[in-house]
Amino acid sequence: MKIGIFGGSFNPPHKKHIEIIKTLIENKHLDKVIFVPTGTKYEYKNNLLPNNIRLDMLKLICNKENNFEVSGFELQDKVVYTYQTLDYFKNKYKDDEIYFICGSDNLSYIDEWKQGKYLLENYKFLVTERDTNNIKPILNKYKEYISNIKVIRTNKDTISSTYIRNKIKDNKLEDVKEYLDKDVYLYIKKNNLYK
């Protein structure tokens, strides 16, 4: 089985996240995807909602899809690095292939991540191309690892969690309703999140 690990803050998760995953599964790049939300101990993300809230929102999405799962592995009292997450799943699913899903913006500086070279050497990457990056120089930068990198083109709309949060903060939740799964939208509304 081909299992994709999809890390991110998911603050909140939105339809673009779902669309990317469905595209990867429908096109047979993956059989299953595990959403792995980043923990609040991650120093570069200081605006995250509590772990349990983001986990709950992801569960609302994953409960509707047979080949979507969510894992709280990174929601620990310490920073968990991507290489540790991928090693964990590689050990858990010994007979399966593990893929890391990321945007081309993340790939562009993955060599600066903790154990970045180790990641490039040991894992397969499914990279979604973003508007803001020209993928060719990035692939050229990592040409020695090119056999582990597959670029996936997705629809280039610009939904982002930041945009959604800012709209909600401005009391415009209705304006972003179309970008959110129905149950996630209701959860945000009921719990008065991002105000």
Image: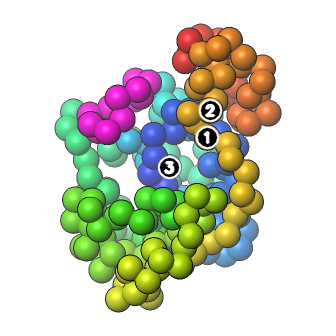
The part of the chain drawn in magenta is 39-51
- Which secondary structure lies at badge 2? helix
| Mark 2 surroundings: few (<14), some (14-19) or many (≥20) residues within 10 A | few
Q: What is the CA distance from the residue labelled 2 to the residue labelled 1?
A: 5 Å
Between discs 1 and 3, the one toward the N terminus = 3
Amino acid type assigned to the residue bearing label 3 in the image: Phe
Circles 1, 3 touching at the beta carbon (< 8 Å): no
Q: Where is residue 112 in the image (x, y as percent from the top left)?
A: 26, 62
Q: The C terminus lies in which quarter of the figure? A: top right
Left or right position of 31 against 121 = right
Left or right position of 49 against 131 = left
Residue 164 appears in view? yes
Q: Quadrant of residue 33?
A: bottom right
In the picture of the structure, the residue carrying the numbered disc 1 is 160
Q: What is the CA distance from the residue labelled 2 to the residue labelled 3?
A: 21 Å
| Mark 1 surroundings: few (<14), some (14-19) or many (≥20) residues within 10 A | some
In the picture of the structure, the residue carrying the numbered disc 2 is 163
Q: Position of residue 106 (x, y in %)?
A: 43, 59
| Magenta segment, prevailing SS (helix, strand or loop) | loop
Q: Quick one: 185 or 136, which is closer to the camera?
A: 136
Identify the residue at horizontal 36%, vertical 35% (top origin). 45
Residue 100 to residue 166: above or below: below
Q: Where is residue 135 in the image (x, y as percent from the top left)?
A: 54, 73
Circles 2, 1 touching at the beta carbon (< 8 Å): yes
In the picture of the structure, the residue carrying the numbered disc 3 is 35
- Which secondary structure lies at badge 3? strand
